[in-house]
Amino acid sequence: MQVSQDLAGVINEREVDHEISPIFPLRWSKRAMSGELITKEELLRLFEAARWAPSSFNNQPWRFIYALRNSEDFDRFSDLLQESNRVWAKEAAVLVLIVSHKTFDKTGQPARTHSFDTGAAWENIALQASHMGFVCHGMEGFDYIQAYDELSIPRDQYVVEAMAAIGKPGNIEILPTKLKEKEHPNTRKPIEEFVFEGRFRSDNSELPPTYR
Ligand SMILES: Cc1cc2nc3c(=O)[nH]c(=O)nc-3n(C[C@H](O)[C@H](O)[C@H](O)COP(=O)(O)O)c2cc1C
C-alpha cells in the first residue's frame, strides 16, 4: 500500500497488486491548487523530464506550449477550457498545451507513433511534477478546434493532444462541493482485463486459470 497525505489531508491509500516503484501510485490528478506561482527553473525541470522520454527513431515529436499564471496568455488558454475544468484549473501556476508533430523532423515522412511518443513525454512531466509535490492534471475538456487558431498551430503538421494544469497543491475547501467529493485517488482495472497472452481477447472467461 502506498500511503501519502496531501496538504488538505487527503490520504492516498492506493493498493497495488504487484510491487512497483511508489512513483506510479503516488501520482494522481488532484484539482485543488493554491494559485501560487512556480519558478522558471521548476518549470524547466518538468520539461527536462519530458525531454528524456523514448520515441520512435528518437524523433521527439512532442511540443509543449505554455502559459504562465498572471499573463495574457494564461487568460487565452483558460478561455479554451470547458467551464467544468476552468473552475479549478484557473488556480494553476501554468497551463500547458500538449501537441505532437505528425512527421519525422529529418525525413518529413509520416511518424506513425507521434501521439504515442508524446503520451510518454506527458507522463514524464506528470511523474516529475508529482515527485516535486506539484499538481499535474491532464485535460481533454477544452476547445480543440479553437486551440489550433488561438495558438497558431499549423493543422497540417501538428496534432493538439491534450492540455495540462500544473501548480502547487491547495486546500480542497476551495473546490465546488461536487469536485470536493471527487478529490481522492481512484483505482484501476485488474491486469487480466487488459493483458493477454498470445492473442487478443475481449472475453475474460477465455483467460488461463492463473489470471482469473
Ligand atoms: C489525456 C487526459 C485527459 C483528461 N481530461 C480531463 C478533463 O478534461 N477533466 C478532468 O477533470 N480530468 C481529466 N483527466 C484526468 C483523468 O480523469 C485521470 O487521469 C483519471 O481518472 C485517472 O486518475 P489519476 O490521474 O488520478 O490516476 C484527463 C486525463 C488525461 C490523461
Image (tube, grey):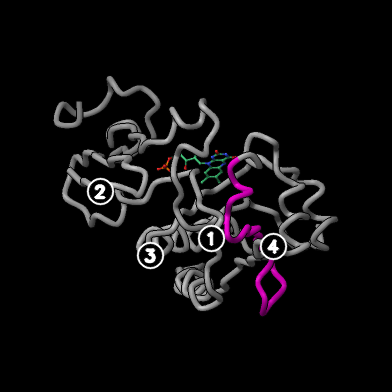
Q: Which of the pair 8/167 is nearer the observer?
A: 8
Which one is in front, 129 or 195? Answer: 129
Which badge, 2 or 3, comes first in the chain's sequence? 2
Q: Which residue is mark 4?
A: 70
Q: Tag 3 or tag 1, which sits nearer the N-term?
A: 1
Disc 3 under 8 Å from ligand 1? The reply is no
Q: CA distance from mark 2 to mark 4?
A: 31 Å
Query: Are the residues tagged 4 and 3 within 8 Å (C-beta)?
Result: no
**For numbered disc 1, what is the local secondary structure?**
loop
Name the residue rendered at 44%, 44% in the picture. 171
Residue 57 at least partly seen: no
Compared to 7, does 198 lie above or below? above
- Element under label 2? strand
- The answer for how far apart the CA atoms under marks 1 and 4 are is 10 Å
Task: Report the span colored magenta.
Answer: 88-109
Residue 211 in the image, given as x and y percentages of width and height: 19, 31
